[in-house]
Amino acid sequence: MISYSNYSIPPVSEFLLICFPNYQSWQHWLSLPLSLLFVLAMGANATLLITIRLEACLREPMYYLLSLLSLLDIVLCLTVIPKVLAIFWFDLRSISFSACFLQMFIMNCFLAMESCTFMVMAYDRYVAICHPLRYPSIITDQFVVRAAIFVVARNGLFFLPVPILSARLRYCAENIIKNCICTNLSVSKLSCDDITFNRLYQFVAGWTLLGSDLILIILSYSFILKAVLRIKAEGAAAKALSTCGSHFILILFFSTVLLVLVITNLARKRIPPDVPILLNILHHLIPPALNPIVYGVRTKEIKQGIQKLLRRL
């Protein structure tokens, strides 16, 4: 029998993704709504990016942050959904060793980047409502650049060890992943090694980053609500709440979906394994599809910009 050291090249060269192991007959039917959501998400975010790029009135810090959010959504969709649809349509279940861990890194890192972007956008709304006179001097183009660097650097550095730790494990037997995507836990549990530290690191890093973002978001909107309730001018409070409404709706939905996904994974023994798999896929589809739609509907300037863009076509 061949023995492998802890740091040798693993004998497993590829993995096989088995989506919905108990309900594989559903895959063709499920592929239709997933493909429609994918087209919607990609089209809506691309339209939003083009609109912000072409319209001079939208070249402001708030819309630059929205552009960053759309870019993150596009990357997340392209990282996960095409492979899922390839499995459903063409039974292309295999994924190379390196591609699997690259997908793992992008999923973990970009979801955390999205959470961090929501936090920066909440701070933007806090300054706009609570310190309107100082807004032009605080929220500048330079602020957006520094915020984007912070978003990328913080989450990239924190989540880079996740795929590295998983890739360094020995995969000397089974290579069948009972999932549609290469999540850390789905992959690492196939290893012959102890994965306690691997799980602990992802848990601590994930909850530290996402938890701190959520706390800061809640604080920002608490201050916003407190400031809005003090506004006595007629219609001013409603206008201020409308300005923040779209942000809060998307943040609440993003956090709720993520929380449901975490709960279903923790209660895996009581819930069919296909449920968290489906929720994981939808988490990479529904928020990206909703983000540009909600902003387009609730933001007058974006709505007008999209209408101009459609008239040019």
Image: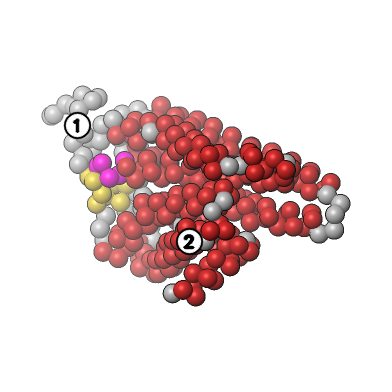
Which region of the structure is painted magenta? Answer: 97-101
Residue 99 on image: x %, y %: 27, 45
Q: Residues within 10 Å of mark 2 (few under 14, many from 20)?
A: some
Image quadrant containing the C terminus: bottom left
Residue 180 on image: x %, y %: 36, 53
Residue drawn where x is 42% and y is 54% of the image: 74
Residue 97 on image: x %, y %: 25, 42
* Element marked by disc 2: helix
* Element marked by disc 1: loop
Q: Which residue is mark 2?
A: 54
**Mark 1 → mark 2, Cα distance in angstroms:** 49 Å
Residue 80 visible to an observer of this rendering: no
Residue drawn where x is 65% and y is 43% of the image: 136
Q: Are marks 1 and 2 in contact (CB under 8 Å)?
A: no
The foreground one among 108 and 197 is 108
Instruction: Please give left or right for residue 217 compared with residue 237 in the image.
Output: left
Instruction: Please give left or right for residue 260 compared with residue 196 in the image.
Output: right
**Placement of 133 over or under 312, stated as above or below:** above
Magenta stretch: includes residue 142: no
Image quadrant containing the N terminus: top left
The foreground one among 283 and 29 is 283
Residue drawn where x is 63% and y is 56% of the image: 246
Number of callouts: 2
- For badge 2, the amino acid type reads Leu
Residue 129 on image: x %, y %: 72, 46
- For badge 1, the amino acid type reads Ile
**Image-quadrant location for residue 104:** top left
Q: Which residue is mark 1?
A: 9
Residue drawn where x is 58% and y is 38% of the image: 213
Magenta segment, prevailing SS (helix, strand or loop) = helix
**Placement of 32 over or under 241, stated as above or below:** below
